Image (cartoon, helix red, strand yellow):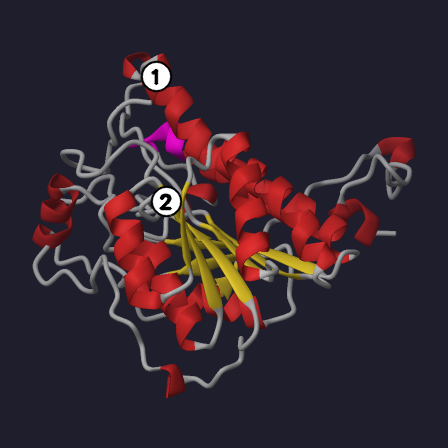
Amino acid sequence: MAESEMIGGRPAAEPGDATGDATVAGMAGMAGVAGVAGSSRAAAAPRGASGPQLEGKVALVTGAASGIGHATAVRLHSAGARLALLDLDDAGGSAAESQLGGLFVHADVGQPADWARAVDRVVSELGRIDIVHLNAGVTTPEADLTAITDEQYRRICAANIDGVFFGARAVVPAMEAGGGGAIVVTASIAGLTAFSPDPVYTLTKHAVVTFVRALAPQLSSKNITINAICPGLVDTPLLGPDARELAAAANFPLIPVTDVAEAVYGRVIASETGQAFVCQVSREPTAYRFAGVPGPGGGAAGRTPPEGLAGEEERRRR
């Protein structure tokens, strides 16, 4: 894989380190941002801040060395969870392990063999997997379709799409064996809208959102919820200096990683599934309302495809 690309600036991390998904939607057309909010690395919260709701649970977080992943690990730890911290950043991952305890595992989320090894080690050393935050992600970033290299395309798909698919496939058997749990995927507002500054990033995030929605009914039978978190501009290492300057000049606030981590935690302890939650500055996370798709007309009006060929929305119409 190539060296890490970030939104609006120079790379600052190793390839595929999955430092947390700094969502890019809304950068197009900005005129330039003072007073950036939040921090890319969260301090450990006091355990008593919210009570030990997750005592005895094991949470696996990808991209846990910094950004949204690290903030989520801190939040889950504060609620009593034991942690499995996955990342390519050995120094950051080891630091998070020292800070929070648990288990650091060096892993490339785009590689199925790494997932098999990671899950085996987590179950062997921590006993179970109850909570999974599939957070790892990168950008290209490149607006011009003809300028996107094969390497850039393969790299972003490996981290943003393969990392979610291989991750879900690897953890579900362990979660089912433990009686169920919760999966939360970091997507983006770019997975709900058309974001021209990075069309391939947009492609990957739309894929993640629809994957979550399609997988939810299947996982419900295993007592596993799955939801997507779709933040706007987040203060993480993936947001480069040029993008930060644009945001500062426009006086546009970035979302603190702790806010996104709180949204992830909310999905872990709630019962809803198959939702895409929008996260914006100074707003409670809100489930996105997808528009209904028109059904057939003519003599087929009001009819739905047979069981096995119908989507969830079509089945709900019956």
Q: Which residue is mark 1?
A: 151
How crowded pointer 1 is (Cα within 10 Å; few <14, some 14-19, many 20+) is rated as few
Q: Earlier in the sequence, mark 2 or mark 1?
A: 2
Q: Which residues are magenta?
A: 196-201
Q: Amino acid at mark 1?
A: Glu
Q: Is residue 148 above or below residue 92?
A: above
Q: Position of residue 237 (x, y in %)?
A: 22, 47
How crowded pointer 2 is (Cα within 10 Å; few <14, some 14-19, many 20+) is rated as many
- The answer to whether one can see residue 217 in this image is yes
- How many marks do you count on the picture? 2
- The answer to whether one can see residue 66 in this image is no
Q: Quadrant of residue 158?
A: top left
Q: Which mark is residue 87?
A: 2
Q: Is residue 127 above or below residue 11?
A: below
Q: Position of residue 67 (x, y in %)?
A: 29, 54
For the point 46% across and 42% down, which residue is it?
191
Q: Amino acid at mark 2?
A: Asp
Q: Secondary structure at mark 1?
A: helix
